[in-house]
Image (tube, helix red, strand yellow):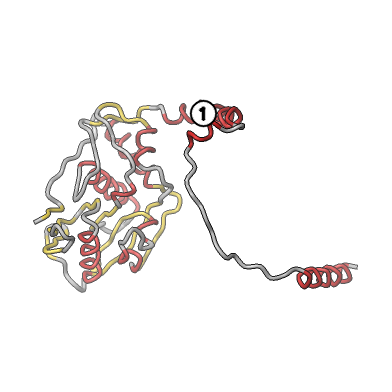
Amino acid sequence: MKRTITVLLLVTAVLHSCQKPHRQVTGITGGNIKVTAIEKSDGAGEVRAIIEKYSAAIDSIKAPVIGTAAAELKVFPPESPLMNFAADALRNMAQRHSDKKIDLAVTNKGGLRSTIQKGTVTFGDVYNVFPFENCLALLTLNGEQLTELFKEIAAVGGEAISGARLTITADGKLTDATINGAKVVPDKEYLIATSDYLAQGNDKLYTLGKGSNKVIKSDITIRDLMVQYIAEQHKKGEAITAHTDGRITIK
């Protein structure tokens, strides 16, 4: 009986596919719809009801204070307090997940979506800065690849880095680079901590996508690492702080 049913289903599927003309997508259009436009729609009340249903629960998650900031942390190129904080915290926390020394941490300034204000820092503040579900990634680059990565960082006007110092030109050329206070050795291997997004070579940091020994910690988000770092500093009675220190200089 099972065999008969299978045959009948197969015949039906074939006949069905023969009766339908072959279709192809010939174009795709799209656009942004402003949230404010909803207020003028017939379903505005329903939309507000849905938002209100979840807003209280979301606010309760965002509200808890996890630490304090000694000063405002903002993002601006080629380096900024928030960029340096994010990279240093990433390197610090990522080291706990590797039995080898992490030479460099890299994250993209475009992924830092807000500012941390001076004073109390809530989970919601960290979520605003790190809204994406990016996970921790560890990978290896040799010295030649590392230099290429530094050239890519120079080309985009700087990114958040920890462990290296770069000198770049205003038009995006790399003129000098050191890693942990030393010149880059072409055939040496360097361990890099970054996000899974950048580890795929995204945001014009193509060389990260070519790394070897790549490990994606899918259960560890960058945001969770930041929350943990800030909370640990708070537990020690320390406010988070960061400043520009010349790790990326334009000359």
Which is more toward the observer, 120 or 180? Answer: 120
Which is more toward the observer, 143 or 111? Answer: 111
Q: Secondary structure at mark 1?
A: helix
109 on left or right of 134: left
Residue 69 figure quarter: top left
Above or below, comparing residue 174 to residue 84 in the picture: below
Above or below, comparing residue 229 to residue 211 in the picture: above
Question: Residue 40: horizontal and vertical position, in percent?
Answer: 54, 31
Q: Quadrant of the N terminus?
A: bottom right
Q: Residue furthest front?
A: 40
Residue at 28% over, 59% down:
192
Question: Residue 169: horizontal and vertical position, in percent?
Answer: 13, 59
Above or below, comparing residue 146 to residue 162 in the picture: below
Number of numbered discs on residues? 1
Above or below, comparing residue 39 to residue 97 in the picture: above
Question: Residue 14: horizontal and vertical position, in percent?
Answer: 79, 72
- The residue under label 1 is which amino acid type? Ala
Question: Residue 195: horizontal and vertical position, in percent?
Answer: 36, 54
Q: Residue furthest right?
A: 1
Can you identify the residue that label 1 sits on?
57
Q: Residues within 10 Å of mark 1 (few under 14, many from 20)?
A: few
Residue 112 figure quarter: top left
Residue at 15% over, 63% down:
174
Q: Quadrant of the C terminus?
A: bottom left
Residue 20 figure quarter: bottom right
